[in-house]
Image: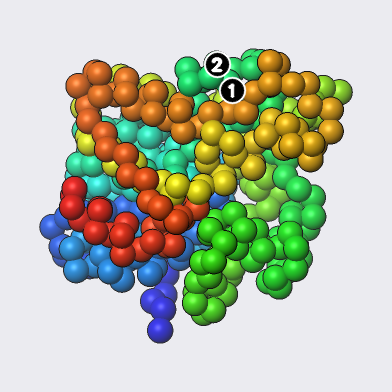
Amino acid sequence: MKPEKQYIATSARKTAYYRMGEGNAKKLILLHGNVSASGFYLPLMEKLKSTFDVAAPDLNGYGKTEASLIKAKTGLFDWAEDIDALAQALGFDSFILAGWSLSGGVAMKYAIEHSEKLEALVLISPMSPFGFGGTKGEYGQMIREDGLGSAGGFVNPAFLKSLADKDKSDAAGTARDVMRRSYFKPGFVPQKEWEDFFVDEIMDMQLGVDYYPGDYTQTAEFPYVLPGTKGINNALAPQYANVSGIADIKSKPPIFWFRGDSDAIVSDNSFSDLAVLGKMGIVPGYPGEDKMPPQPMIAQTRYVFEKYKANGGQYTEFVIEGARHSCHIEKEDEFINLLLSVI
C-alpha cells in the first residue's frame, strides 16, 4: 500500500511531499522532473529510507502542492527558493539535493543561491546548464537573444489535449505513451500498478499559459515559435534558465551526475530539440546546421562541470547502460549502489 502525501506549510506555500526514514542523520531531498511529480520517487525512497531521512516534494505547478503562477524569468529561482523554504520547515540545515531532468536545473540554481547548505548535489539526466533549446556549441552560445530555437511554451497540441482530457489510455500521444517511449528505454515497463500510479501523478499537473506549457509567440522563421514569459516550459528557455554560473560558486559540494546511455530527452541529439526534429524532416523548413545546429546538451553540461572542477570543485559522471531518461527507475539497483558508493 502506497503512503499518503503529507502537507507542510512553509514560508512559501503549502507543499505536498513524501517523507521516509525520518530521524536518520543523512538528509536527502529529491526533486522530480517535468511532466511528473514526487510519486515517481516512491520506489526509490523505499530502498533509501534505511540510510536517509528522505523527502520528495511536488514542485509548484505539479502534484498536490499549492500552486501560484509561474513566471518564466524567475522560474528556476522561485522553485529553488521553495525548496529552501521546505528544507527550513523540515529542519534540514544541511542536506543532499537531487534533481531529475528539469529539476537538475532547479538543483543547480539552488547551489548557486545556497551552496553552503549542500553536502552533495546529485543530478539525474539534468537539463543543460544553458537551458533547453536555442543554444549551440559546448559554450552555450544563444542562437538569438529572443530564444529562437527553443520551443518555450509550445508543446504538441494533441499531447496537451490528452492531459486536459485526463486520458489515461495507451493511445498514441497520451501521457502513458509518451512516458513509455521517452522516459524509459524500449523493453522496460514498470509494474502495472506503478505505471498507473505514475500516470495519475502526471495528471495532477497544472495546465495553461501560466503553468504547463506556458505561452509562446509565433514567428515566420523556423521553428515558427518563440518562448513566452509565462509557465513551466518557458522557465527552461535559454534567456531565463542559464545556470552555468554554478562553475563559479564559492562553496563547492561534490556533484554526482547520473544519466542513461540512451537518453532521448537530454542528449546531444535530443528528440525534444526542435533543431533535431527539423534536421530529421519532422518539422519542415529547417535552415540547416550552420544556422541552427542541434543543442549539444551533454557536451554543454560536461563543459560547465569541467569549469567547476578547474575552479576547485569535483564531479563524477556515471553513465548507466540500458537506461533512457529515468535511470533511477529503469536501473534502480545499479543507481542505488552507485549512489551509496559515493555518499
Q: Is residue 218 visible?
A: no
Is 235 or 221 nearer to us in this picture?
Answer: 221
In percent of width and height, residue 207 lies at: 68, 53
Q: Quadrant of the N terminus?
A: bottom left
Q: In percent of the image, x 22 and y 26: which residue is there?
A: 313
Q: Are marks 1 and 2 in contact (CB under 8 Å)?
A: yes
- SS of the residue under disc 2: strand
**Residue identified by numbered label 1:** 135
How packed is label 2: few (under 14 Cα within 10 Å), some, or many (20 or more)?
A: some
In percent of width and height, residue 130 lies at: 50, 26
Above or below: residue 150 compared with residue 340? above
Residue extending farthest left: 25
In percent of width and height, residue 325 lies at: 50, 51
Q: In percent of the image, x 42 and y 30: which residue is there?
A: 301
Q: In percent of the image, x 54 and y 66: which residue is there?
A: 187
Residue extending farthest right: 220
**Residue identified by numbered label 2:** 141
Q: Earlier in the sequence, mark 1 or mark 2?
A: 1
Above or below: residue 310 compared with residue 229? above
- SS of the residue under disc 1: strand
Is 63 or 257 nearer to us in this picture?
Answer: 257
